[in-house]
Amino acid sequence: MARIDHRPFLQPHPQDLPVVMLHGSASGPRQWTGLSEFLGGRHQTLAPRMPGYGRDDAPDMTVTERADSLMAGVLSGTTALHLVGHSFGAVVALDIAARFPARVASLTLIEPVAFFETDTADRFEAMGRSARVALEEGDAYAASARFIDFWFGAGAWTRSSLAFQQNTARFAGRVMGDFAALMEMKTRRPEFATIAAPVLMQFGTASAPEMAQVGTALAARLPNAEIHRIDGAGHLPHLSDPHVSHPAIGDFLVRSAAGWHSDQRQAAA
Protein backbone atom coordinates (compact mmCIF):
# COMPACT_ATOMS: atom_id res chain seq x y z
CA MET A 1 0.00 0.00 0.00
CA ALA A 2 1.19 3.49 -0.83
CA ARG A 3 2.41 5.72 1.99
CA ILE A 4 -0.49 7.69 3.49
CA ASP A 5 -0.09 11.36 4.33
CA HIS A 6 -1.59 11.96 7.78
CA ARG A 7 -1.59 15.74 7.47
CA PRO A 8 -5.16 16.03 6.10
CA PHE A 9 -6.51 14.79 9.45
CA LEU A 10 -4.80 17.51 11.49
CA GLN A 11 -6.97 20.37 10.22
CA PRO A 12 -10.78 20.60 10.60
CA HIS A 13 -12.53 20.78 7.25
CA PRO A 14 -15.91 22.57 7.54
CA GLN A 15 -17.35 20.88 4.45
CA ASP A 16 -16.62 17.33 5.56
CA LEU A 17 -19.58 15.14 6.37
CA PRO A 18 -20.01 13.37 9.73
CA VAL A 19 -18.66 9.84 10.13
CA VAL A 20 -21.15 7.45 11.74
CA MET A 21 -19.68 4.23 13.19
CA LEU A 22 -21.82 1.16 13.92
CA HIS A 23 -20.51 -1.49 16.31
CA GLY A 24 -20.91 -5.23 15.96
CA SER A 25 -22.22 -8.04 18.14
CA ALA A 26 -21.34 -8.29 21.84
CA SER A 27 -19.84 -4.82 21.69
CA GLY A 28 -20.68 -1.14 22.09
CA PRO A 29 -19.78 2.37 20.96
CA ARG A 30 -16.50 2.40 22.88
CA GLN A 31 -14.92 0.09 20.30
CA TRP A 32 -14.70 3.20 18.11
CA THR A 33 -12.68 5.35 20.52
CA GLY A 34 -9.40 4.89 18.65
CA LEU A 35 -10.79 5.54 15.18
CA SER A 36 -12.80 8.51 16.45
CA GLU A 37 -9.65 10.03 17.96
CA PHE A 38 -7.73 9.44 14.74
CA LEU A 39 -10.38 11.11 12.57
CA GLY A 40 -11.49 13.71 15.10
CA GLY A 41 -9.13 16.44 13.92
CA ARG A 42 -11.03 16.64 10.65
CA HIS A 43 -14.38 14.89 11.00
CA GLN A 44 -17.28 14.99 13.40
CA THR A 45 -17.73 11.40 14.52
CA LEU A 46 -20.80 9.69 15.94
CA ALA A 47 -20.91 6.19 17.43
CA PRO A 48 -24.50 5.33 18.42
CA ARG A 49 -25.48 2.25 20.35
CA MET A 50 -26.85 -0.37 17.99
CA PRO A 51 -30.64 -0.75 18.28
CA GLY A 52 -31.21 -4.04 20.05
CA TYR A 53 -28.42 -3.31 22.54
CA GLY A 54 -30.19 -0.69 24.64
CA ARG A 55 -31.43 -1.57 28.10
CA ASP A 56 -35.07 -1.61 27.00
CA ASP A 57 -34.59 -2.75 23.39
CA ALA A 58 -36.02 -5.98 22.07
CA PRO A 59 -33.08 -8.19 21.06
CA ASP A 60 -34.88 -9.74 18.09
CA MET A 61 -35.00 -6.74 15.75
CA THR A 62 -34.32 -7.41 12.08
CA VAL A 63 -31.48 -5.68 10.25
CA THR A 64 -33.97 -3.40 8.48
CA GLU A 65 -35.72 -2.51 11.75
CA ARG A 66 -32.38 -1.52 13.27
CA ALA A 67 -31.47 0.56 10.22
CA ASP A 68 -34.84 2.31 10.29
CA SER A 69 -34.50 2.98 14.02
CA LEU A 70 -31.12 4.63 13.47
CA MET A 71 -32.29 6.73 10.53
CA ALA A 72 -35.41 7.88 12.39
CA GLY A 73 -33.54 8.48 15.63
CA VAL A 74 -29.93 9.54 16.15
CA LEU A 75 -29.24 9.98 12.41
CA SER A 76 -32.42 11.91 11.59
CA GLY A 77 -30.62 15.24 11.68
CA THR A 78 -27.94 14.26 9.14
CA THR A 79 -28.50 15.08 5.48
CA ALA A 80 -25.53 12.99 4.32
CA LEU A 81 -22.85 10.98 6.07
CA HIS A 82 -19.97 8.55 5.82
CA LEU A 83 -20.91 5.15 7.26
CA VAL A 84 -18.45 2.79 8.97
CA GLY A 85 -19.57 -0.58 10.33
CA HIS A 86 -17.89 -3.56 11.91
CA SER A 87 -19.14 -7.14 11.66
CA PHE A 88 -22.91 -7.11 12.29
CA GLY A 89 -22.81 -3.30 12.28
CA ALA A 90 -21.39 -3.47 8.75
CA VAL A 91 -24.46 -5.42 7.62
CA VAL A 92 -26.73 -2.74 9.10
CA ALA A 93 -24.61 -0.12 7.32
CA LEU A 94 -25.09 -2.02 4.05
CA ASP A 95 -28.85 -1.97 4.54
CA ILE A 96 -28.84 1.79 5.20
CA ALA A 97 -26.72 2.44 2.11
CA ALA A 98 -28.99 0.28 -0.06
CA ARG A 99 -32.25 1.91 1.06
CA PHE A 100 -31.03 5.49 1.63
CA PRO A 101 -28.39 5.85 -1.11
CA ALA A 102 -28.70 9.63 -1.35
CA ARG A 103 -27.73 9.95 2.32
CA VAL A 104 -24.51 7.89 2.16
CA ALA A 105 -21.33 9.47 0.77
CA SER A 106 -19.14 6.46 1.48
CA LEU A 107 -19.34 3.04 3.09
CA THR A 108 -16.56 1.37 5.09
CA LEU A 109 -17.23 -2.27 5.96
CA ILE A 110 -14.86 -3.90 8.45
CA GLU A 111 -15.22 -7.69 8.44
CA PRO A 112 -18.89 -7.57 7.34
CA VAL A 113 -20.67 -10.78 8.38
CA ALA A 114 -22.67 -10.95 5.15
CA PHE A 115 -22.66 -14.76 5.11
CA PHE A 116 -26.00 -14.64 3.29
CA GLU A 117 -23.95 -13.68 0.20
CA THR A 118 -22.00 -16.96 0.11
CA ASP A 119 -22.50 -20.71 -0.07
CA THR A 120 -19.87 -21.28 2.62
CA ALA A 121 -21.86 -20.33 5.72
CA ASP A 122 -22.36 -23.85 7.10
CA ARG A 123 -19.83 -23.51 9.91
CA PHE A 124 -21.19 -20.10 10.94
CA GLU A 125 -24.78 -21.34 10.95
CA ALA A 126 -23.80 -24.45 12.94
CA MET A 127 -22.09 -22.22 15.50
CA GLY A 128 -25.23 -20.10 15.80
CA ARG A 129 -27.51 -23.10 16.27
CA SER A 130 -25.21 -24.61 18.89
CA ALA A 131 -24.96 -21.31 20.76
CA ARG A 132 -28.74 -20.92 20.71
CA VAL A 133 -29.23 -24.39 22.22
CA ALA A 134 -26.75 -23.57 24.97
CA LEU A 135 -28.52 -20.29 25.71
CA GLU A 136 -31.93 -21.97 25.79
CA GLU A 137 -30.47 -24.40 28.33
CA GLY A 138 -29.49 -21.43 30.48
CA ASP A 139 -25.74 -21.49 29.78
CA ALA A 140 -24.77 -18.06 28.48
CA TYR A 141 -21.08 -18.88 29.01
CA ALA A 142 -21.23 -21.92 26.72
CA ALA A 143 -23.16 -19.91 24.12
CA SER A 144 -20.54 -17.17 24.22
CA ALA A 145 -17.71 -19.70 24.00
CA ARG A 146 -19.10 -20.94 20.67
CA PHE A 147 -19.17 -17.37 19.37
CA ILE A 148 -15.65 -16.40 20.52
CA ASP A 149 -14.02 -19.65 19.38
CA PHE A 150 -15.57 -19.28 15.92
CA TRP A 151 -13.96 -15.88 15.43
CA PHE A 152 -10.70 -16.27 17.28
CA GLY A 153 -9.94 -19.98 17.08
CA ALA A 154 -10.54 -23.03 19.22
CA GLY A 155 -9.63 -22.41 22.85
CA ALA A 156 -9.82 -18.61 22.61
CA TRP A 157 -12.64 -18.55 25.17
CA THR A 158 -10.77 -20.56 27.77
CA ARG A 159 -7.70 -18.35 27.31
CA SER A 160 -9.77 -15.22 27.95
CA SER A 161 -9.89 -13.42 31.29
CA LEU A 162 -12.78 -13.95 33.66
CA ALA A 163 -13.77 -10.29 33.25
CA PHE A 164 -13.93 -10.69 29.47
CA GLN A 165 -16.01 -13.86 29.79
CA GLN A 166 -18.45 -12.21 32.19
CA ASN A 167 -18.86 -9.16 29.97
CA THR A 168 -19.32 -11.22 26.80
CA ALA A 169 -21.77 -13.64 28.40
CA ARG A 170 -24.12 -10.82 29.39
CA PHE A 171 -24.55 -10.07 25.67
CA ALA A 172 -25.37 -13.67 24.72
CA GLY A 173 -29.07 -12.99 24.16
CA ARG A 174 -28.27 -9.95 22.05
CA VAL A 175 -25.82 -11.94 19.95
CA MET A 176 -28.46 -14.56 19.26
CA GLY A 177 -30.78 -11.75 18.17
CA ASP A 178 -28.10 -10.61 15.73
CA PHE A 179 -27.73 -14.17 14.44
CA ALA A 180 -31.48 -14.42 13.83
CA ALA A 181 -31.39 -11.10 11.97
CA LEU A 182 -28.64 -12.42 9.67
CA MET A 183 -30.63 -15.58 8.98
CA GLU A 184 -33.60 -13.40 8.03
CA MET A 185 -31.35 -11.59 5.53
CA LYS A 186 -30.49 -14.96 3.99
CA THR A 187 -34.15 -15.69 3.27
CA ARG A 188 -34.67 -12.50 1.25
CA ARG A 189 -31.14 -11.71 -0.10
CA PRO A 190 -31.09 -7.90 -0.11
CA GLU A 191 -30.60 -5.78 -3.21
CA PHE A 192 -27.38 -3.76 -3.34
CA ALA A 193 -27.65 -2.37 -6.88
CA THR A 194 -28.85 0.95 -5.45
CA ILE A 195 -25.55 1.53 -3.60
CA ALA A 196 -23.69 4.14 -5.63
CA ALA A 197 -21.28 5.25 -2.90
CA PRO A 198 -17.64 4.13 -2.92
CA VAL A 199 -17.05 1.16 -0.61
CA LEU A 200 -13.96 0.15 1.36
CA MET A 201 -13.94 -3.36 2.82
CA GLN A 202 -11.32 -4.29 5.41
CA PHE A 203 -10.54 -7.90 6.27
CA GLY A 204 -7.95 -9.56 8.48
CA THR A 205 -6.06 -12.40 6.85
CA ALA A 206 -6.17 -14.36 10.14
CA SER A 207 -9.94 -14.01 10.58
CA ALA A 208 -12.41 -16.84 10.05
CA PRO A 209 -11.59 -18.36 6.64
CA GLU A 210 -15.12 -17.78 5.38
CA MET A 211 -14.56 -14.03 5.42
CA ALA A 212 -12.42 -14.19 2.27
CA GLN A 213 -15.42 -15.58 0.38
CA VAL A 214 -17.64 -12.88 1.87
CA GLY A 215 -15.30 -10.20 0.52
CA THR A 216 -15.22 -11.71 -2.95
CA ALA A 217 -19.01 -12.12 -3.05
CA LEU A 218 -19.70 -8.57 -1.89
CA ALA A 219 -17.16 -7.06 -4.26
CA ALA A 220 -18.98 -8.75 -7.15
CA ARG A 221 -22.21 -6.97 -6.17
CA LEU A 222 -20.78 -3.59 -5.17
CA PRO A 223 -19.42 -1.90 -8.30
CA ASN A 224 -17.41 0.77 -6.47
CA ALA A 225 -15.78 -1.50 -3.89
CA GLU A 226 -12.14 -1.92 -2.96
CA ILE A 227 -10.78 -4.58 -0.61
CA HIS A 228 -8.04 -3.94 1.95
CA ARG A 229 -6.63 -7.07 3.58
CA ILE A 230 -4.54 -6.57 6.72
CA ASP A 231 -1.87 -9.22 7.15
CA GLY A 232 -2.07 -11.16 10.39
CA ALA A 233 -5.15 -9.36 11.69
CA GLY A 234 -8.22 -11.20 12.93
CA HIS A 235 -11.86 -10.19 13.16
CA LEU A 236 -11.05 -6.85 14.85
CA PRO A 237 -8.43 -5.23 12.59
CA HIS A 238 -9.37 -1.70 13.64
CA LEU A 239 -8.52 -2.65 17.23
CA SER A 240 -5.61 -5.06 16.76
CA ASP A 241 -3.91 -3.12 13.94
CA PRO A 242 -5.04 0.50 14.22
CA HIS A 243 -1.76 1.74 12.74
CA VAL A 244 -2.79 0.06 9.48
CA SER A 245 -6.59 0.18 9.62
CA HIS A 246 -7.16 3.78 10.69
CA PRO A 247 -4.92 5.56 8.14
CA ALA A 248 -6.43 3.49 5.34
CA ILE A 249 -9.95 4.47 6.43
CA GLY A 250 -8.93 8.11 6.77
CA ASP A 251 -7.42 8.16 3.30
CA PHE A 252 -10.55 6.55 1.87
CA LEU A 253 -12.78 9.16 3.53
CA VAL A 254 -10.74 12.02 2.10
CA ARG A 255 -10.95 10.53 -1.41
CA SER A 256 -14.66 9.80 -1.04
CA ALA A 257 -15.43 13.29 0.25
CA ALA A 258 -13.70 14.85 -2.77
CA GLY A 259 -15.88 12.77 -5.09
CA TRP A 260 -19.03 13.56 -3.10
CA HIS A 261 -18.52 17.32 -3.21
CA SER A 262 -17.70 17.17 -6.92
CA ASP A 263 -20.94 15.26 -7.61
CA GLN A 264 -22.94 17.77 -5.54
CA ARG A 265 -21.49 20.71 -7.46
CA GLN A 266 -22.30 19.06 -10.77
CA ALA A 267 -25.86 18.31 -9.63
CA ALA A 268 -26.37 21.93 -8.60
CA ALA A 269 -24.98 23.33 -11.88
Image (spheres, rainbow, N blue to C red):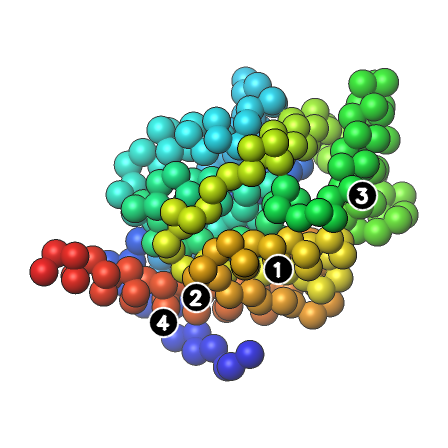
- Indicate whether 139 appears above or below 164: above
Sequence-wise first label, 1 or 4: 4
Residue 134 is labelled as none
The answer to which of marks 3 and 4 sits earlier in the sequence is: 4
Tag 2's secondary structure? Answer: helix
Q: CA distance from mark 3 to mark 4?
A: 42 Å
Whether 138 is drawn above or below 255: the answer is above
The crowding category of the residue bearing disc 4, from other C-alpha atoms within 10 Å (few below 14, some 14 to 19, many at least 20), is: some
Nearer the observer: mark 1 or 2; the answer is 1
User: Nearer the viewer's eye, disc 4 or disc 2?
Assistant: 2
Which structural element holds mark 3?
helix
Is residue 70 visible to us here?
yes
Residue occupied by mark 4: 8
Q: Which numbered disc flags the more N-terminal residue, 3 or 1?
A: 3
Identify which amino acid the numbered label 2 is placed on: Phe
At a point 29% along the width and 66% down the height, the residue shown is 258
* CA distance separating discs 2 and 3: 32 Å
Q: Dividing the image into 4 quarters, which one contains the N terminus?
A: bottom right
| CA distance for labels 1 and 4 | 31 Å
Which residue shows up at 60% across the image and 41% down it? 88
Measured in 3D between alpha carbons, the distance from the residue under mark 3 to the one under mark 1, in whole angstroms, is 18 Å
Query: Which residue is disc 1 drawn over?
Result: 216
Residue at disc 4, secondary structure: helix
